Image: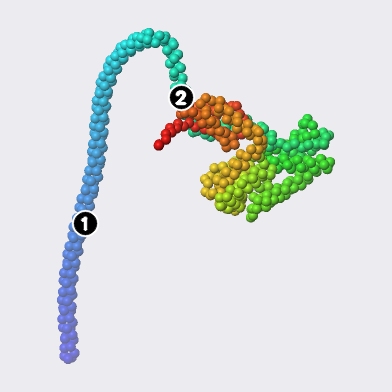
Amino acid sequence: MDNMVTPIIVGIVALAIGFLIAKLIERNNASQLIKSAKKNAASVLKEAKTEAESIKKDKILQAKEKFIELKSEHEKVINKRESKMSEAEKRTKDKESQVSSELAKTKKLNSQIEKKQKEYDERLDFLEKKQNEVEKFRKSQIEQLEVISALSADEAKAQLVESLKDEAKTDAMKYVQSSIEEAKMTAQQEAKKIVINTIQRIGTEEAIDNCVSVFNLESDDVKGRIIGREGRNIRALESATGVEIIVDDTPEAIILSCFDSVRREVARLSLHKLVTDGRIHPARIEEVVKKTSKQIEDEILEVGKRTVIDLGIHGLSPELIKAVGRMRYRSSYGQNLLHHSREVARLCGVMASELGLNPKLAKRAGLLHDIGKVPETETEVPHAILGMQWAEKYGEKPEVCNAIGAHHDEIEMTSLLSPIVQVCDAISGARPGARRQVLDSYIQRLKDLEDIAFGFNGVNKAYAIQAGRELRVMVESEKVSDDRASQLSFEISQKIQTDMTYPGQVKVTVIRETRAVNVAK
């Protein structure tokens, strides 16, 4: 029993000791926890204070920055206002200075004006006095001159007028010359006037010769058949050919009028076929005109080919050959264009051979130089330029193209063929009789030109050259002055213009020279 109690007591004592130890340990842990909590609390408080200090500093800095910003904005506003005020003050000062300077200038000008007015009044008085003195002196001089010369004032005036006539003529000629120079500034209008005058003087005759064909009839009975019932036949014929048919009282003749010579020829041949056949009605007219047109086209082509072969020209474009054939039905200044072109081609070939140039190219250029005159459609381009464009289009050489375009000085000459073609064209046109001028009338025209020149005083010699296109007048230097020479040229040109009828224009050149000849021995 004692053995069982002892362990129980020992166990109880051990439990009590263990309980005490546990309590002590627990108490010790609690004190440590309290210490750590206090530590943590102190650290948290420290951190909170630190954070509060930093936030405080930030807020203070933000407040300072905001203050500085507001202060700068305020200073800007103040500076702006101050600058505006300074500018306004400156402008005010400038205005004041300007006004003061203007006032000073005005005062100065007023004083100068007053001074000038005073001087003007003084000078006016002086001039009036001098004028009175001069008038008295002039009267006394006139009286003395009348006594010395034994002439009255009116007689002296008459002599003075006579002496001043030559000077007046010279001044008038100078004025005319200046007027002519001014007229050159408006050359286009002057050219139009010249063209209109030329058309008025010779246009009617040329138009009749070149635009009208006469179709002869066996009897006047055929006229009614050509006109047809209610004019149907003649209207159909005019519509098909494009030619105006005039049926008037002319016995046994019908007039065909049209600018296009090819159409006129078509109408003439068609009428001939219809009259010969006897069947004249609208359907038959259209058929015959169509056939005739085809015939004329074939004939044009054949004429072109024959012309090219005769001249020994090879490799010509078919279109250019056709244009050459159309020249047969075209006239220029009354001269058949094909005959003219053939003549120019032959002349060009001869000249080129003599000068050592290519005669074939020269003939080619001479034959084609006027192809611009036969366009199928009317154009405003000059015929030389149009012909050059055609030649370029159909592959002609540059020398030939330049010769075609430059034969009337439309463009600059770049090859030796160009002046040859120009000269040969002038030779063919200037030949007496080439352009419907017989030799007698041609010579008479030259003589008339020279006679007009000899009708003026001081003319020594006169020569009509360039087929009557230019008149050169030699005058005596003792009788004709330089100014009078210019006047004489003008008077002769006016006399020719009013007294003669001529195509184109006549250039009048007055030559005056003074020669001093000595012989050294």
Count residues near mark 1 (Cα–Cα under 10 Å), then give few for <14, some for 14-19, many for 20+.
Answer: few
Count residues near mark 2 (Cα–Cα under 10 Å), then give few for <14, some for 14-19, many for 20+.
Answer: some
Query: Which is more foreground, mark 1 or mark 2?
Result: 2
- The answer to which of 264 and 330 lies nearer the viewer is 330
Query: Vertically, is 125 above or below 275?
Result: above
Estimate the x, y position of residue 414 in percent, counting from the top left.
Answer: 52, 48
- The answer to which of 69 and 259 lies nearer the viewer is 259
Q: Estimate the spatial distance between the alpha carbons at disc 1 and disc 2, rounded to whole Å.
A: 113 Å
Residue behind mark 1:
55
Residue behind mark 2:
170
Asked if residue 192 can be seen in this view, the reply is no
Q: Amino acid at mark 2?
A: Thr
Is 37 displayed left or right of 126 in the figure? left
Q: Earlier in the sequence, mark 1 or mark 2?
A: 1
- The answer to which of 406 and 453 lies nearer the viewer is 453
Query: Vertically, is 326 above or below 102?
Result: below
Q: Residue 263 lies in what quarter of the image?
A: top right
Q: Secondary structure at mark 1?
A: helix
Residue at x-position 66% and y-position 35%: 438
Asked if residue 44 can be seen in this view, the reply is yes
Residue at x-position 62% and y-position 30%: 501
Estimate the x, y position of residue 279 in percent, counting from the top left.
Answer: 83, 42
Residue at x-position 72% and y-position 49%: 298
Q: Residue 508 lies in what quarter of the image?
A: top right
Is 514 displayed left or right of 441 in the figure? left
